[in-house]
Amino acid sequence: MYAVEMINYGDLDVLTDTQTAQRPEIKSKQVLVQQHATAIVPYDVKFRQGLMGTDKPTPLIPGSSVSGQVIAVGDEVENFSIGDRVAASTHLRSYAQYVAVSQSLLAKIPDNVSYETAAATVLGAQTGYQMVTVDLDIQPGESVLIHGGAGSVGSAAIQAARLRGAQTIYTTASSTATAYLQAIDSQVQVIDYRTTALTQALPEGVDVILDTIGDDTLQQSLNVLKPQQGRLVSLVEDATDQRVQHSYLKSNGQRLETLLGLVSVGKMSIKIAQVAPFDAENMKQFQTLKHVLGKLVLTFD
Protein backbone atom coordinates (compact mmCIF):
# COMPACT_ATOMS: atom_id res chain seq x y z
CA MET A 1 0.00 0.00 0.00
CA TYR A 2 0.99 3.64 -0.37
CA ALA A 3 2.31 5.40 2.73
CA VAL A 4 4.76 8.00 3.96
CA GLU A 5 7.42 6.39 6.14
CA MET A 6 10.00 7.72 8.57
CA ILE A 7 13.30 6.01 7.79
CA ASN A 8 14.89 7.54 10.90
CA TYR A 9 14.33 10.30 13.44
CA GLY A 10 15.48 13.76 12.43
CA ASP A 11 14.87 16.49 9.88
CA LEU A 12 12.36 16.48 7.03
CA ASP A 13 14.52 14.27 4.83
CA VAL A 14 13.62 11.23 6.95
CA LEU A 15 10.10 11.32 5.44
CA THR A 16 9.78 9.33 2.24
CA ASP A 17 7.09 7.92 -0.04
CA THR A 18 6.66 4.17 -0.35
CA GLN A 19 4.36 2.06 -2.47
CA THR A 20 5.29 -1.19 -0.73
CA ALA A 21 4.19 -0.67 2.87
CA GLN A 22 2.45 -3.70 4.30
CA ARG A 23 -1.31 -3.40 4.45
CA PRO A 24 -2.36 -3.91 8.10
CA GLU A 25 -4.22 -7.00 9.26
CA ILE A 26 -7.01 -6.21 11.69
CA LYS A 27 -7.58 -7.85 15.06
CA SER A 28 -10.97 -8.97 16.34
CA LYS A 29 -11.89 -5.57 17.83
CA GLN A 30 -10.46 -3.45 15.04
CA VAL A 31 -11.71 -2.11 11.73
CA LEU A 32 -9.71 -1.39 8.59
CA VAL A 33 -10.15 2.18 7.37
CA GLN A 34 -9.36 3.39 3.89
CA GLN A 35 -8.02 6.89 4.44
CA HIS A 36 -9.57 9.94 2.80
CA ALA A 37 -7.84 12.65 4.84
CA THR A 38 -5.22 13.11 7.55
CA ALA A 39 -4.04 16.23 9.35
CA ILE A 40 -0.64 17.60 10.28
CA VAL A 41 -0.44 18.00 14.05
CA PRO A 42 2.37 19.31 16.30
CA TYR A 43 2.77 15.88 17.91
CA ASP A 44 3.63 14.34 14.53
CA VAL A 45 6.33 16.96 13.93
CA LYS A 46 7.84 16.47 17.39
CA PHE A 47 7.72 12.69 16.97
CA ARG A 48 9.57 12.91 13.67
CA GLN A 49 12.22 15.11 15.29
CA GLY A 50 12.72 12.56 18.07
CA LEU A 51 11.42 14.91 20.78
CA MET A 52 8.86 12.33 21.92
CA GLY A 53 11.47 9.60 22.27
CA THR A 54 13.31 7.41 19.78
CA ASP A 55 12.55 3.97 21.17
CA LYS A 56 10.33 2.79 18.31
CA PRO A 57 12.40 1.14 15.56
CA THR A 58 12.43 2.66 12.09
CA PRO A 59 11.32 2.60 9.37
CA LEU A 60 7.82 3.23 10.65
CA ILE A 61 4.63 4.95 9.53
CA PRO A 62 3.89 8.04 11.67
CA GLY A 63 0.70 10.09 11.87
CA SER A 64 -2.09 10.57 14.40
CA SER A 65 -5.34 11.33 12.55
CA VAL A 66 -7.65 8.99 10.68
CA SER A 67 -10.61 10.02 8.54
CA GLY A 68 -12.02 7.59 6.03
CA GLN A 69 -14.32 4.70 5.27
CA VAL A 70 -14.53 1.28 6.90
CA ILE A 71 -13.67 -1.50 4.44
CA ALA A 72 -13.35 -4.46 6.86
CA VAL A 73 -14.43 -5.23 10.43
CA GLY A 74 -13.14 -7.65 13.05
CA ASP A 75 -15.43 -10.41 14.28
CA GLU A 76 -15.92 -8.74 17.70
CA VAL A 77 -16.63 -5.24 16.39
CA GLU A 78 -19.97 -3.73 17.38
CA ASN A 79 -21.77 -0.67 16.00
CA PHE A 80 -19.50 -0.26 12.95
CA SER A 81 -20.06 -1.70 9.48
CA ILE A 82 -18.38 -1.72 6.10
CA GLY A 83 -19.08 1.60 4.41
CA ASP A 84 -19.29 3.70 7.57
CA ARG A 85 -17.55 7.07 7.45
CA VAL A 86 -15.34 7.19 10.55
CA ALA A 87 -12.64 9.22 12.27
CA ALA A 88 -10.17 8.55 15.07
CA SER A 89 -6.93 9.69 16.63
CA THR A 90 -4.36 6.90 16.62
CA HIS A 91 -0.83 6.67 17.96
CA LEU A 92 1.14 6.43 14.68
CA ARG A 93 0.35 4.66 11.39
CA SER A 94 -2.15 7.15 9.96
CA TYR A 95 0.10 8.40 7.13
CA ALA A 96 -1.01 5.48 5.01
CA GLN A 97 -3.68 4.42 2.55
CA TYR A 98 -5.12 1.91 5.06
CA VAL A 99 -5.15 2.04 8.87
CA ALA A 100 -6.22 -0.54 11.44
CA VAL A 101 -8.15 1.20 14.24
CA SER A 102 -9.54 -0.11 17.52
CA GLN A 103 -13.30 0.33 17.78
CA SER A 104 -12.94 2.16 21.11
CA LEU A 105 -11.24 5.06 19.29
CA LEU A 106 -13.72 5.28 16.43
CA ALA A 107 -16.42 7.87 15.85
CA LYS A 108 -18.91 8.00 13.02
CA ILE A 109 -18.70 11.14 10.92
CA PRO A 110 -22.02 12.96 10.42
CA ASP A 111 -23.17 13.15 6.82
CA ASN A 112 -22.70 16.92 6.59
CA VAL A 113 -19.12 16.87 7.99
CA SER A 114 -16.38 16.41 5.41
CA TYR A 115 -13.49 13.99 5.74
CA GLU A 116 -11.16 16.99 5.83
CA THR A 117 -13.00 18.59 8.75
CA ALA A 118 -13.14 15.29 10.61
CA ALA A 119 -9.38 14.80 10.19
CA ALA A 120 -8.82 18.33 11.50
CA THR A 121 -10.94 17.56 14.57
CA VAL A 122 -9.66 14.26 15.88
CA LEU A 123 -6.55 15.27 17.82
CA GLY A 124 -6.25 18.96 18.71
CA ALA A 125 -9.96 19.71 18.96
CA GLN A 126 -10.66 16.45 20.79
CA THR A 127 -7.91 17.37 23.26
CA GLY A 128 -9.35 20.83 23.92
CA TYR A 129 -12.84 19.41 24.29
CA GLN A 130 -11.68 16.74 26.74
CA MET A 131 -9.73 19.26 28.82
CA VAL A 132 -12.78 21.49 29.24
CA THR A 133 -15.49 18.87 29.73
CA VAL A 134 -13.59 16.21 31.69
CA ASP A 135 -10.23 17.30 33.14
CA LEU A 136 -11.20 20.85 34.13
CA ASP A 137 -14.94 20.15 34.24
CA ILE A 138 -15.73 23.83 33.72
CA GLN A 139 -18.93 24.94 35.41
CA PRO A 140 -21.39 27.71 34.51
CA GLY A 141 -20.28 31.12 35.72
CA GLU A 142 -16.57 30.33 36.05
CA SER A 143 -13.84 32.53 34.63
CA VAL A 144 -11.41 30.75 32.32
CA LEU A 145 -7.95 31.42 30.88
CA ILE A 146 -6.92 29.32 27.87
CA HIS A 147 -3.36 29.69 26.65
CA GLY A 148 -2.65 29.46 22.94
CA GLY A 149 -6.21 30.11 21.83
CA ALA A 150 -5.26 30.35 18.16
CA GLY A 151 -4.10 26.72 18.11
CA SER A 152 -6.39 23.77 17.49
CA VAL A 153 -6.47 22.77 21.17
CA GLY A 154 -7.07 26.30 22.38
CA SER A 155 -9.71 27.27 19.84
CA ALA A 156 -11.74 24.13 20.60
CA ALA A 157 -11.34 24.72 24.33
CA ILE A 158 -12.66 28.29 23.99
CA GLN A 159 -15.77 27.05 22.20
CA ALA A 160 -16.32 24.16 24.62
CA ALA A 161 -15.96 26.50 27.61
CA ARG A 162 -18.59 28.79 26.10
CA LEU A 163 -20.95 25.83 25.66
CA ARG A 164 -20.36 24.90 29.31
CA GLY A 165 -21.52 28.36 30.39
CA ALA A 166 -18.20 29.96 31.34
CA GLN A 167 -18.76 33.55 32.42
CA THR A 168 -15.62 35.18 31.04
CA ILE A 169 -13.09 33.54 28.72
CA TYR A 170 -9.60 34.92 28.26
CA THR A 171 -6.95 33.62 25.92
CA THR A 172 -3.33 34.44 25.21
CA ALA A 173 -2.28 34.99 21.61
CA SER A 174 -0.45 37.49 19.45
CA SER A 175 -2.41 40.56 18.44
CA THR A 176 -2.37 39.35 14.83
CA ALA A 177 -4.62 36.45 15.83
CA THR A 178 -7.29 38.61 17.51
CA ALA A 179 -9.59 38.81 14.49
CA TYR A 180 -9.27 35.05 13.92
CA LEU A 181 -10.18 34.32 17.54
CA GLN A 182 -13.08 36.74 17.67
CA ALA A 183 -14.50 35.15 14.53
CA ILE A 184 -14.59 31.91 16.54
CA ASP A 185 -15.98 33.56 19.70
CA SER A 186 -16.96 37.21 19.55
CA GLN A 187 -16.80 37.59 23.34
CA VAL A 188 -13.38 36.08 24.00
CA GLN A 189 -10.91 38.51 25.57
CA VAL A 190 -7.49 38.25 23.93
CA ILE A 191 -4.36 38.99 25.99
CA ASP A 192 -1.30 39.78 23.87
CA TYR A 193 1.33 37.70 25.66
CA ARG A 194 4.14 39.73 24.10
CA THR A 195 3.06 43.04 25.62
CA THR A 196 0.84 42.33 28.61
CA ALA A 197 1.62 40.46 31.83
CA LEU A 198 -1.04 38.11 33.13
CA THR A 199 -1.12 39.83 36.51
CA GLN A 200 -1.82 43.10 34.73
CA ALA A 201 -4.58 41.66 32.56
CA LEU A 202 -6.18 39.54 35.31
CA PRO A 203 -5.77 41.39 38.63
CA GLU A 204 -8.66 39.47 40.21
CA GLY A 205 -7.46 36.09 38.98
CA VAL A 206 -9.41 33.30 37.27
CA ASP A 207 -11.06 30.07 38.36
CA VAL A 208 -9.72 27.77 35.66
CA ILE A 209 -6.63 27.70 33.42
CA LEU A 210 -5.69 25.46 30.50
CA ASP A 211 -1.93 25.58 29.90
CA THR A 212 -0.74 24.46 26.48
CA ILE A 213 2.74 25.99 26.70
CA GLY A 214 4.45 25.18 30.02
CA ASP A 215 7.72 26.60 31.42
CA ASP A 216 7.41 30.29 32.38
CA THR A 217 3.82 30.40 31.19
CA LEU A 218 2.82 27.77 33.73
CA GLN A 219 4.60 29.60 36.52
CA GLN A 220 3.07 32.94 35.59
CA SER A 221 -0.35 31.32 35.40
CA LEU A 222 -0.12 30.26 39.03
CA ASN A 223 0.08 33.96 39.93
CA VAL A 224 -3.43 34.56 38.55
CA LEU A 225 -5.05 31.26 39.56
CA LYS A 226 -7.47 31.75 42.45
CA PRO A 227 -5.88 30.35 45.61
CA GLN A 228 -8.65 28.09 46.91
CA GLN A 229 -11.02 26.81 44.23
CA GLY A 230 -8.67 27.49 41.31
CA ARG A 231 -7.55 24.59 39.13
CA LEU A 232 -5.10 24.33 36.25
CA VAL A 233 -4.50 21.58 33.71
CA SER A 234 -1.22 21.59 31.81
CA LEU A 235 -0.66 19.58 28.65
CA VAL A 236 3.08 20.12 28.94
CA GLU A 237 4.36 19.57 32.47
CA ASP A 238 3.56 19.00 36.11
CA ALA A 239 4.03 21.27 39.13
CA THR A 240 4.20 20.90 42.90
CA ASP A 241 1.17 23.15 43.34
CA GLN A 242 -1.80 20.95 44.25
CA ARG A 243 -4.06 22.97 41.99
CA VAL A 244 -2.11 21.75 38.92
CA GLN A 245 -2.88 18.56 37.03
CA HIS A 246 -0.76 17.27 34.14
CA SER A 247 -2.97 15.66 31.50
CA TYR A 248 -3.04 14.48 27.89
CA LEU A 249 -5.52 13.29 25.30
CA LYS A 250 -7.21 10.04 26.22
CA SER A 251 -8.72 9.40 22.83
CA ASN A 252 -12.29 8.22 23.11
CA GLY A 253 -14.60 7.37 20.22
CA GLN A 254 -17.84 8.26 22.02
CA ARG A 255 -16.50 11.66 23.09
CA LEU A 256 -15.17 12.31 19.59
CA GLU A 257 -18.55 11.41 18.13
CA THR A 258 -20.21 13.93 20.47
CA LEU A 259 -17.72 16.56 19.35
CA LEU A 260 -18.30 15.81 15.66
CA GLY A 261 -22.03 16.11 16.36
CA LEU A 262 -21.47 19.62 17.71
CA VAL A 263 -19.49 20.45 14.57
CA SER A 264 -22.34 19.06 12.47
CA VAL A 265 -24.94 21.39 14.01
CA GLY A 266 -22.67 24.46 13.99
CA LYS A 267 -22.00 24.64 17.74
CA MET A 268 -18.27 24.03 17.23
CA SER A 269 -16.20 25.46 14.37
CA ILE A 270 -13.08 23.73 13.02
CA LYS A 271 -10.96 25.98 10.81
CA ILE A 272 -8.89 24.54 7.94
CA ALA A 273 -6.03 26.67 6.65
CA GLN A 274 -4.92 24.62 3.65
CA VAL A 275 -5.58 21.28 1.93
CA ALA A 276 -3.18 19.43 -0.37
CA PRO A 277 -2.82 15.92 -1.85
CA PHE A 278 -1.24 13.32 0.42
CA ASP A 279 2.42 12.73 -0.41
CA ALA A 280 5.79 13.17 1.26
CA GLU A 281 6.61 16.48 -0.43
CA ASN A 282 3.39 18.17 0.66
CA MET A 283 3.82 16.72 4.13
CA LYS A 284 7.32 18.16 4.36
CA GLN A 285 6.08 21.56 3.21
CA PHE A 286 3.24 21.58 5.74
CA GLN A 287 5.57 20.52 8.57
CA THR A 288 7.77 23.57 7.94
CA LEU A 289 4.92 26.08 8.34
CA LYS A 290 4.78 28.06 11.59
CA HIS A 291 1.96 29.91 13.37
CA VAL A 292 -0.70 28.76 10.91
CA LEU A 293 -4.26 29.77 11.79
CA GLY A 294 -6.29 26.64 11.15
CA LYS A 295 -5.42 23.04 10.37
CA LEU A 296 -3.30 21.68 7.53
CA VAL A 297 -4.90 18.64 5.89
CA LEU A 298 -3.69 16.10 3.31
CA THR A 299 -6.24 14.21 1.23
CA PHE A 300 -6.01 10.80 -0.42
CA ASP A 301 -8.72 11.43 -3.05
Image (tube, grey):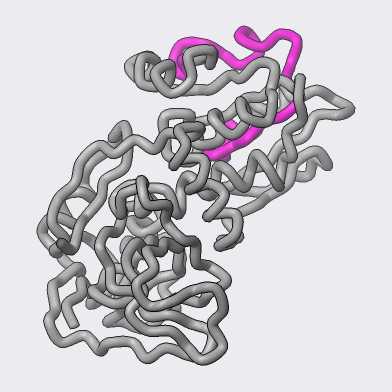
Q: Nearer the viewer, residue 29 or 39?
A: 29
Q: Nearer the viewer, residue 41 or 183?
A: 183
Q: Which residues are magenta?
A: 191-217
Image point 62% across, 29% down: which residue? 163
Rendered location of residue 278, percent (x, y): 16, 61
Image point 37% across, 78% down: which residue? 82
In magenta stretch: residue 275: no
| Rendering quarter of residue 92 | bottom left
Examine the rendering and report whether any part of residue 155 can be seen.
Answer: no
Rendered location of residue 158, percent (x, y): 55, 29
Looking at the rendered structure, the number of numbered marks drawn on it comes to 0
| Above or below, 54 relative to 174 | below
Image point 38% across, 57% down: which residue? 46
| Rendering quarter of residue 84 | bottom left
Q: Nearer the viewer, residue 28 or 223?
A: 28
Rendered location of residue 209, percent (x, y): 67, 31
Q: Judge from the rendering whether residue 78 lies leftward or rightward of residue 10; answer left or right.
A: right
| Above or below, 111 relative to 151 | below
Q: Judge from the rendering whether residue 261 lies leftward or rightward of residue 254; answer left or right.
A: left
In magenta stretch: residue 208: yes
Examine the rendering and report whether any part of residue 146 can be seen.
Answer: yes
Q: Quadrant of the C terminus?
A: bottom left
Image point 69% across, 24% down: which residue? 165
Q: Quadrant of the N terminus?
A: bottom left
Rendered location of residue 175, percent (x, y): 38, 14
